[in-house]
Image (tube, rainbow, N blue to C red):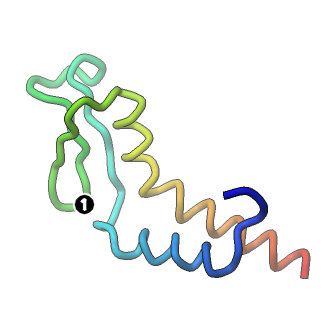
Amino acid sequence: MNGPLTNDEIEAIKARCEQATAGPWKSFIEKRDKISGSDFIQTGGEDFYLSGATIADYDFIAHARQDIPRLIAEIERLRSINR
């Protein structure tokens, strides 16, 4: 997993993003967000719970749904400039 991303790798990442539940996703942490109940990630349609995950794990997973498409777009923009 070293070296620049290939076009095939970028396309595979994009496909995984497009197949995931539409965003935005948001993490809800009981103590941090002052909610009662369990920590969970709210997706476009459902909530899901992770066993043994840290707050950082919840935040990372929830933000990935928004962050990865933006990062891919930036990679593609930069590559188009350098052609």
Residue appearing at x 57%, y 79% in the figure: 11
Q: Is 80 on the left or on the right of 7, as rendered?
A: right
Furthest-front residue in this view:
1
Furthest-right residue in this view:
82
Furthest-left residue in this view:
37
In this rendering, is residue 83 above or below 46? below
Asked which quadrant contains residue 28, the reply is top left
Residue appearing at x 53%, y 59% in the figure: 68
Residue appearing at x 35%, y 27% in the figure: 55
In this rendering, is residue 45 above or below 82? above
Q: Nearer the viewer, residue 42 or 54?
A: 54
Q: Is 55 on the left or on the right of 44, as rendered?
A: right
Which quadrant of the rendered structure holds the C terminus? bottom right
Q: Nearer the viewer, residue 2 or 49?
A: 2
Residue 34 is situated, as x and y percent measured from the top left of the image, at: 21, 20
Q: Is 14 on the left or on the right of 28, as rendered?
A: right
Determine which residue is flagged by label 1: 44
Report helix, strand or loop for mark 1: loop
Furthest-top residue in this view:
31
Residue 39 is situated, as x and y percent measured from the top left of the image, at: 20, 31
Residue appearing at x 42%, y 71% in the figure: 16
Under mark 1, the amino acid is Gly
Q: Nearer the viewer, residue 44 or 60?
A: 60
Residue 32 is situated, as x and y percent measured from the top left of the image, at: 30, 19
In this rendering, is residue 56 above or below 5? above
Residue 12 is situated, as x and y percent measured from the top left of the image, at: 52, 76
Which quadrant of the rendered structure holds the N terminus? bottom right
